[in-house]
Image: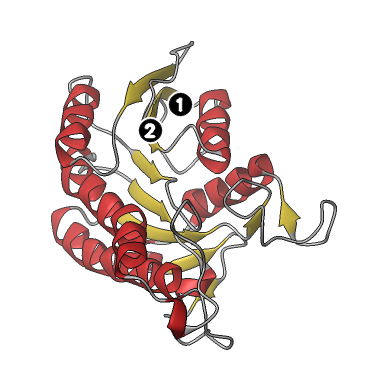
Amino acid sequence: MLSAFSHGYRAAVFGASGGIGGAFAAHLAADPRAGAVYAGARRPIPSSGKTLGFAFDLEDESSIAAAVERIGADGPLDLIVVATGVLHAPGLQPEKTYRALSGDAFARAFAINATGPALIAKHGCERLVRDRRAVFAALSARVGSISDNRTGGWHAYRASKAALNQIIVCLALELARRSPQALALALHPGTVATGLSAPFRPASGSAGLFTPEESARNLLRVINTAPREASGRLLAWDGAEITP
């Protein structure tokens, strides 16, 4: 239950067809304090109860703008969660050496992990409430921390998540001038049993491996309890700050 938000709060989840995004939408819809939960994906998610599906294309700004306009027509939002991201795909694999670097892979990683969330913020933050707590949160990763990099590799993914963390800092500074109760957060979900982590995660049942439901519940707790001064920071699933 998101007790820090007003009763009847309105939330939007971008990337609700993914494991963590779907769990976010389900947890929010189950919260008796929630008024409406907008669940977005490339293919429309069926609406049911307080869950209202919408379609958007993360690589098409016009579709993001149109989706936000439709959502905003119902009133301002209290919470925006961006649960999108890519680590591996056809033509995109985590690099083990600089010899494997590819301009196409970098362009793809940045488009999904940094540019897409930035464009959601561009259009979505205009729809956040101004007179009470509001949060824009995006899934990032510990490996996006430059100071925490001890092993190297995964160049495009690390760089794109580091870029997202910087975007969140810039967004937090601007939101503070717009609304003193608004926060922008980058969130590290831990290792989660989803398709994104499948080739790289420990075996099922291993310590430190979360289900999507557990991860979303942990991160919603962080969203609910994060103090105002945490805006702009990268927070782990347990609320601990990860240094840039």
- Cβ–Cβ below 8 Å for labels 2 and 1? yes
Could one spot residue 173 in this view of the protein? yes
Residue 75 versus residue 33: which sits nearer the camera? 75
Could one spot residue 1 in this view of the protein? no
- Dot 1 crowding, Cα within 10 Å, few <14, some 14–19, many 20+: many
Q: What residue does disc 2 label?
A: 11
- Dot 2 crowding, Cα within 10 Å, few <14, some 14–19, many 20+: many
Under mark 2, the amino acid is Ala
Q: Please identify the quarter of the rendering in which residue 80 is found.
A: top left
86 horizontally vs 132: left or right:
right
Residue that appears at 57% across and 57% down: 189
Residue 216 versus residue 1: which sits nearer the camera? 216
Q: Please identify the quarter of the rendering in which residue 234 is found.
A: bottom left
Q: Position of residue 211 (x, y in %)?
A: 70, 45
Q: Secondary structure at mark 1?
A: strand
Which quadrant of the rendered structure holds the N terminus? top right
Under mark 1, the amino acid is Ala
Residue 14 versus residue 107: which sits nearer the camera? 107
Q: Which mark is residue 34?
A: 1
